Image: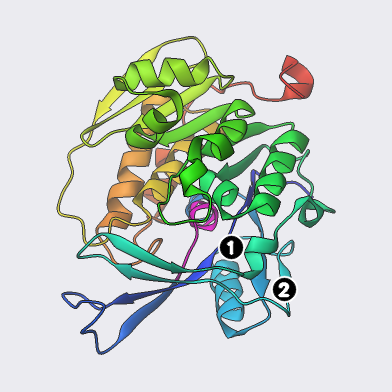
């Protein structure tokens, strides 16, 4: 049993008002699921890669709904544990204000720990993925994230993914930098990377991040994307944004497109462009994953040449 990607993190039931409505005045809500790692897994599955998601959900209807939705997308959920003592987290999205309210204190995923990786074929996966959200949720989830990266022998991918209002957000750098230091590929927003390594231009941020261990660093900015390769080459691609309907989840979609290209031996520049297409598509529709492309054209977009090496048992990377 092997996977292209094994991801670890919390997913919540997501509620959002209909088009043009506010949270306060909505007569109905769009019911969806939302979680940085599972969002990326959905995108990878739509692009034809095999993704497994590891987490905890409450033994409740929201947990049932999330599992059914992810399984319908082709994401393997066999390693998800159901917790009869804790509930599934819930979030309310306000696309007009680009704001999110979380109700996740004491959630099932807040009890995640290294034990949840028992029986998961982490070492056999071509890549593993975790975000800074997991490190901020609590000490157990952070320990699980570090254990995932420590057990991996494929590409170790980290998105720092700062979310204000989470329990550990006031200790962001302290909690997330240990993940970054164990990563091979970092996919980060410009502002959150600046909070981790200090202010600077995107290329400077990427090089300071790489000095901490990662071999490849992507910096997502407002109007352009940059990527620092393992050979030290800095590649920039401009973004031409339209009016977003719901920008929440666009970064996760970018990550899926970028990672799919790199895992299919694609070049960095191709990966950046694929990530932009995926992120833009998601931002143009309500929901974190509804707009992610799943056509045959999207699959062809990620079939390139120039495969990176990321097997630590072969390259002698950090254990």
CA gap between label 1 and label 2 equals: 19 Å
The quadrant of the image that shows the C terminus is top right
Residue 91 occupies quadrant: bottom left
Residue in the image at 72% along x and 73% along y: 82
Disc 1, SS: loop
Label of residue 82 in the image: 2
* Foreground residue among 129 and 23: 23
Is 38 contained in the magenta span?
yes
Q: Which mark is residue 74?
A: 1
Give the image location of residue 110, x and y in percent. Answer: 64, 62
Q: Residue at x 37, y 29 (%)?
A: 194
287 sits left or right of 315 in the view: left
Q: In the drawing, does residue 111 fall left or right of residue 303?
A: right
18 shown above or below 214: below
Magenta part mainly helix, strand or loop? Answer: helix
Magenta-drawn segment:
33-42
Indicate the position of residue 113 as horizontal and vertical percent values.
Answer: 74, 54
Residue 273 point in image, percent of width and height: 33, 34
- Above or below residue 178? Residue 64 is below
Q: Residue at x 69, y 37 (%)?
A: 149
The quarter holding residue 199 reads top left
């Amino acid at each position: 049993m092997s996977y292209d990607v094994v991801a670890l993190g919390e997913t919540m039931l997501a509620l959002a008002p209909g088009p043009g409505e506010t949270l306060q005045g909505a007569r109905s809500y769009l019911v969806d699921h939302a979680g940085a790692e599972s969002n990326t897994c959905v995108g990878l599955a739509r692009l034809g890669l095999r993704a497994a998601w590891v987490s905890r959900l409450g033994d409740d209807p929201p947990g049932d709904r999330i599992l059914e939705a992810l399984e319908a997308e082709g994401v393997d959920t066999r390693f998800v544990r159901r917790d009869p003592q804790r509930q599934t987290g819930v979030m309310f999205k306000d696309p007009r204000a680009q704001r999110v309210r979380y109700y996740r204190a004491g959630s099932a995923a807040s009890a995640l720990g290294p034990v949840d990786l028992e029986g998961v074929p982490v070492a056999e996966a071509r890549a593993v993925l975790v975000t800074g959200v997991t490190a901020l949720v609590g000490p157990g989830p952070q320990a699980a994230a570090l254990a995932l990266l420590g057990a991996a022998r494929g590409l170790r991918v980290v998105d720092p993914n700062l979310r204000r209002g989470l329990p550990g957000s006031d200790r962001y750098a302290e909690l997330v930098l240990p993940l970054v230091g164990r990563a091979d590929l970092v996919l980060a927003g410009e502002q959150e990377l600046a909070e981790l390594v200090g202010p600077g231009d995107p290329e400077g941020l990427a090089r300071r991040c790489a000095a901490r261990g990662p071999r490849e660093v992507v910096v997502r900015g407002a109007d352009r994307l940059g990527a620092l390769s393992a050979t030290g080459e800095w590649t920039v691609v401009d973004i031409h944004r339209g009016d977003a309907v719901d920008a929440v989840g666009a970064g996760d979609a970018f990550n899926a497109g970028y990672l799919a290209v790199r895992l299919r031996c694609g070049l960095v520049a191709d990966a950046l462009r694929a990530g932009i297409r995926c992120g833009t598509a998601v931002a143009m529709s309500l929901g974190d994953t509804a707009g992610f492309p799943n056509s045959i054209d999207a699959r062809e977009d990620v079939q390139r040449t120039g495969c990176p090496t990321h097997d630590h048992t072969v390259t002698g990377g950090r254990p």
